[in-house]
Amino acid sequence: MRSITIARKLLTPGCVAAALLLSVSAAAQEAPKPVMDPASSQDEIKQFCTNIADPARDQRYLLQKQELEKLQADVDQRIATMDKRKAEYEDWLKRRDDFLKTADSGLVDIYKNMKPDAAAASLNDVKVTVAAAIIMKLSPRQSSLILAEMDAQKAAVVTNIISSASDPNTSKSKDPS
């Protein structure tokens, strides 16, 4: 018991466990040993701690390395997810720009100068995406007048296309048409 008390006073916190193991194993032996000099047991404990210091440090480094590798894998996965989302957004933006280009300014000017009922009748007969692109480039007042004159079902489809074209959350799996 005295060797444990001495070991606790002399050892650093990292070697206390090693000292306890050394003293417990010494006490567990059947044959009683002659009383050891405290200085010699201190030397034994210091030598034991010195001997296990490098392997213990190596084990700590190995555990830290494994933790860093796990964190790196998590970061890599998050980067891949961000890259995927970026590609989806760029694709959506390209499709939206292409959609808006289908109604060039000359065609828009034609519908801009038409009466709403005549424009609505004409837009009822064109592709829904073209009609949506044209209406989207007109002023809000003129667009509302044309949509009011269009067939209700076609106007609803055009409105859905316009709203999905302006929604940044629309993914590439959803086609605005």
Image (cartoon, rainbow, N blue to C red):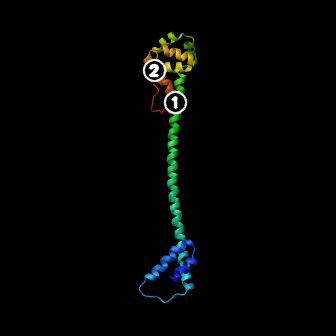
Classed neighbour count for the residue bearing mark 2: other residues with Cα under 10 Å, few (<14), some (14–19), many (≥20): few
Residue 102 versus residue 143: which sits nearer the camera? 143
Q: Using the image, tell me which numbered label, if any, was put on residue 156.
A: 2
Kind of residue at disc 2: Ala
Query: Residue 138, can we see it?
Result: no
Answer whether labels 2 and 1 touch (C-beta < 8 Å). Answer: no
Kindly give the residue lying farthest to the left in the view shown.
30
The image quadrant of residue 104 is: top right
From the top left corner, tell me how far across and down residue 36 is, in percent: 52, 87
Label 1: element kind: loop
Q: In this view, does 30 lie to the left or right of 93?
A: left
Of callouts 2 and 1, the N-terminal one? 2
The image quadrant of residue 13 is: bottom right
Count how many numbered circles sit on residues in the image. 2
Q: Write the residue at 54% across / 75% down.
A: 49
- Compute the Cα span from label 2 to label 1: 16 Å
Q: Write the residue at 55% across / 77% down.
A: 8
Kind of residue at disc 1: Asp
From the top left corner, tell me how far across and down residue 164 is, in percent: 49, 27
Q: Write the residue at 52% across / 45% down.
A: 79
Label 2: element kind: helix
Q: Using the image, tell me which numbered label, if any, was put on residue 167.
A: 1
Query: Residue 124, can we see it?
Result: yes
From the top left corner, tell me how far across and down residue 41 is, in percent: 54, 83
Q: Using the image, tell me which numbered label, if any, was put on residue 125.
A: none
Classed neighbour count for the residue bearing mark 1: other residues with Cα under 10 Å, few (<14), some (14–19), many (≥20): few
- For the C terminus, the image quarter is top left
Note whether 173 is above or below 30 in the view shown: above
Q: Write the residue at 53% across / 34% down.
A: 90
From the top left corner, tell me how far across and down residue 106 is, in percent: 57, 15
